[in-house]
Amino acid sequence: MRRILLTPQEIEEVASGKRVIDYVSGRAVMATPEEIESSQPISKQLVEDYGYPKDLITTRPQYRVKARPSDSGKEYPVDIAIFSNPKKRPEDLYIVVEAKRSGSKPEDDPDRQIFNYLRFSSAQIGIWTNGEERQFFRKVVNGDQIDFEQIPNLPRFGEKIDSVGKYLRENLVPPRNLSLTFKAIRNHLAGNTVGTTRDEILATQLINIVFCKIFDEKFKSPKDLVDFRAQIGEDPEEVKLRVLDIFNKVKHKYSDVFDTTDEISLDAKSLAWVVGELQPFCLIEAARDAVGEAFEIFIGATLKGGQGQFFTPRNVVQLMVELVDPKPADLVIDPACGPGGFLVESLRHKWNLLEKQAKKLNWNESALAEEKTSTAIKSINGIEKDSFLSKVAKAYMAIMGDGKGGIFCEDSLDDPKNWQINTQQHVLMGRFDVVLANPPFGADIKVSGYEKLIQFDLGHKYQKGVKTDKLVETQNPQVLFVERCIQLAKQKGKVGLILPETYFHAPSTKHVTDMLMQHNIIALIDLPHNTFRPFNNAKCVAIIFQKGVKQQEKILMVAAEEMGHNHQGKTIFRYNHDSHSLSEEVWDDIHSALLEIRGEKESEFTFNVDAQKVKDSGILIPRYYWPKLNEAFIDPKNRDLEWITIRELIDQGVIIEKSGHGSPPSHFKGKGSFPYIRVKDIISWEIYRNPTSMIPEAEFKRLTKSYPLEFEDLVYVSRGSYRIGDVAIVGPQDSNVAITREIRILRIAKENSSGLTPYYLLYLMSTMQVLKQTKARVFIDTTLPNIADRYLDIKLPWHTDPEKRLEISKRVEIAVTSKWDAMEGIRDLLKELRPDDQVEDLDIEEDESELTPQE
C-alpha cells in the first residue's frame, strides 16, 4: 500500500487531536466521534482479528455505491469497503461497513442504510456498528427478491460465509481486540436480554459462558469441531443446548468449584449472539486475560472501585513473572489474587520450563501432562477476599491446570488464626518461594481494628522513621500488604508487588520504602500512567525483591511510556515519525521490555543502575535514572557546552530560590484588582492575569509581604499539574501579582560572577535537554504530580563561550520585551477607546477544562 505523507498542517492537527491517522489508508482524517468511536476500532479489528489485508480495504477516500438502481453515478459513501480483489472493481466489493457514533441506534426499517449499501452493490456482507454494538448481515438473493439475514459473525479472510460457526479447534485465532468484543457483548446484552440487565448479573453470566469457551478450547483436539459455536441459520435453542451441555461438563468435572445451582440463564437468542461473537477466537491464547477483561468490561469502576479491585493487564503480569522466574517446584502465592491472573501466568511459566525439561529428558506426552497437573495442584496458591472473585479464580485455575485446591476465600490481612482450618494448613507464614500481588488500593478503603493492625510494624505510627508503640487509627491496605507479602515469603524467597508511585519516593511514606530496601531489590518497573485506566487513575511502580538477601550490586530498571492502551482503554499504535503515520505495531513498551530481558531485542526500556546510588537517593522510580531522559542528549564531543545545575548556581550566590506566596481564601478571588496567579496561568514564558482571580490589595500585600516579585524574576511550575517545568519571566506589569505555592521564584543576582542573565536562564530552562530531565523527575505525590527540589539538580546546557551566552540572552530579551511593548501599546489604545473601563488584561480567558491536570 502506498505510504501517505502528511502536510505540516495535518501533522499539527494530528498532534492537537483535531485529526486522527486513518488506520487503513494512513491519511489524516477529522477526529469525529464516528471515526474515534467506531470507524477506527472496527478497521483495526477487521485487519488484526479477521485477517483482511489493508490492500483489500478502502476507507479514505470513501468508496461510493448507488443510491437507487436507476442511478448512473454513485452517491452513497461507504465508511469501510472490503474487496475480494486488490483491483477493487465494483464486482469485487465483498463487505460494506456502516459506522455510526456511540449511542446511535440501529434503524428498525427494511429500507435502512446498510441494506441499501448491499442492495445497490455487489457486496455480500454488511456490518453495522456504533463502536459499542454491532450487527452482521448477509445478502440473500432469490430471483428478483433480495433479503437480509443476520448472521452470528463475520467470516475471516479466506473463509466462505457458510463456514461461520464451523470451526475446528486449530482454526481458532488469538484475539487482539478482545475489549471491543466484550464491550459489544455487554451493550448488546444490556439492551436486548430478557429478564437480566444489571451488570453484575450479566458479568456472572458472561463469566460462566467464558468458562464454557475456555473448557471447550482446552479439551478439544486440533481437528475436532468445537461445540462452542453458532452456525448461520441455526436455531438459537440448539446453540443453547450445546452450551448448557458444556456447562454441565464444567460443573461435573469441577463440582467443588461450581454449585449445582449455578446456571446460564440467558435467553437462547442472547446466548447464541454471545457465542457468535466469541466463537472465532481462542481465549486461552489471548494477549490479555480474558476472564479479567470480561469482568472489568461488565463491572466497571462502579462496583470494583469501592474495593480497589483493579486487575493487572497480562503484559505487566508476564513481565513480572518473567523477572521472578518461578521454577516448577516453587510454591507460589498471590494474597490478593482476584480472578487469578498472576497464578495462571505463573503456571504457564512453570509449564514452559517443564516442556523444555521434557524435551531434554525425552518424556512422553503422558509423563509431561502428569507433571503439569501435579505442578498446578501442589504449587499454586491464592487468597481472595471477594467470594465471587475467589470462585472465578478457582474455576479459572481448575480449567487451566487443576490448581483450584490452592485458592482460598479469606481476608489476607486478618489474623491467620481467624482463617478456616484448611487455609491455615496450606497458607503458612515464611513458606512460599514466590509471592506476587497487586494489592487493592484506593482513597476510600482503609483497614482498622486492633487485631489486624497489631500484626504489622506498618500498622504502627512512625516518628522520624522509627516505629513507635502506638497503632495508627486506620491504614491503607496496600501498606499492610507489603508487610504481609514479606511475611509469607521464605528466606531468599522472591516478592513481586505493584504499589502506587508515592511509596517509592515520598518522605511521607519513607518507612514503607525503608522496609522494601531492607531486602535485595532485583528489579523496578516504571508502569505507564495508563496501566490501570480507565478503571483507576493511579500511577504505579512494580518491584521485585528477594527477602533477607544482601543487596546485589545492580538493580534492573524498566522504564515504559505506554503499555498498549490509552486512558480510555483503547488500543494505541506506535507512531512512525519518519513517515508521519501510525504503524501496525501496538505501542507496548512493557512487551518490548520483556523481549529485551529475554535477549530477543536490543535494550531501550531496560537498563541497570548501581544499587548504592538508588539507596543513597531513596528514589526507587526507574525513569529518574533512565538514560533516555538523563544522559542520551549529552554529546561528549560537544566541547562548547558544560553542564551546570540550578543548585550549583544557588550555592554560588548567582540565583536566589524561593517558594510561591500561597493561596488567598476563596471568597477573595474575583473581588479585587491584584492578580492571583495559579499554575495554569504560566503560559509560553508569560504570566496570564485571569480577571476572575483578582484579589483585594490587602490580601495581596499579606501574601507577598515577605518576598514580593520583582521585574525579571523567573517563576517556575513545580507541583500539581502536567505543566510542571513551564517557566515565565516577570514583566514590567507583573510585579504586582501574587503566586500560588506550587510556583517557585528564581531571582538572578545582579552583576553575578557567572554573567547569568534572566533571559539566558529562561532559555536554558526551556531547552529540550531540560524538558526531558524534568519528565524524569516529576513523580506522583499522593494524587498530584510534583517535582519538589529535584528540579534543582537538572543539568543545564551552559555555553562555555561568554559571547554565545550574551548573544542568546539578547535574542530572548528582544523577543520578550517586544511583546511586552506591543501589549502595552494595545492597552493604551484601548484606554483611549474605552476611557471609562479599566483594562486589566487583553488575553481571552482560557477554557479551564483544557488546563485541568489529568492526574
Image: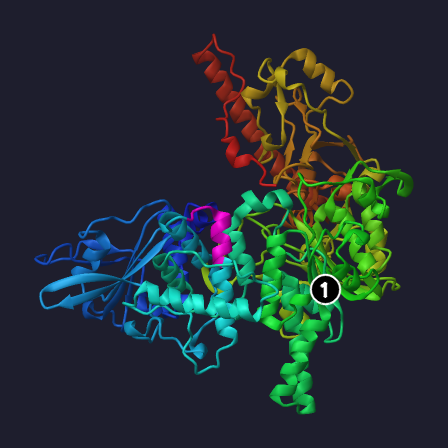
Quadrant into which the N terminus falls:
bottom left
Q: Viewer-proximal residue, 358 or 584?
A: 358
Residue type at the position of mark 1: Phe
Q: Residue drawn at (60%, 13%), measured in percent from left and top?
A: 672
Magenta stretch: includes residue 201: yes
Most extreme residue toward the bottom is 362
Q: Left or right: where does residue 102 sit relative to residue 685? A: left
Q: Quadrant of residue 156?
A: bottom left
**Majority SS type along the magenta span:** helix
Give residue 342's position: percent from left, percent from top: 66, 63
Q: Left or right: where does residue 476 sit relative to residue 726? A: right
Q: Viewer-proximal residue, 35 or 758?
A: 35
Q: Residue drawn at (91%, 43%), measured in percent from left and top?
A: 466
Most extreme residue toward the front is 260
Give residue 47's position: percent from left, percent from top: 39, 66
Instruction: Tell me: residue 598, above or below residue 116.
Output: below
Q: Residue drawn at (15%, 67%), measured in percent from left and top?
A: 141
Instruction: Tell me: residue 250, above or below residue 312.
Output: below
Question: Tag 1, which secondary structure?
Answer: strand
Q: Which residue is mark 1?
A: 607
Give residue 431's position: percent from left, percent from top: 82, 65
Q: Quadrant of residue 666?
A: top right
Q: Which residues are magenta?
A: 196-206
Instruction: Tell me: residue 361, above or below residue 280.
Output: below
Magenta stretch: includes residue 208: no
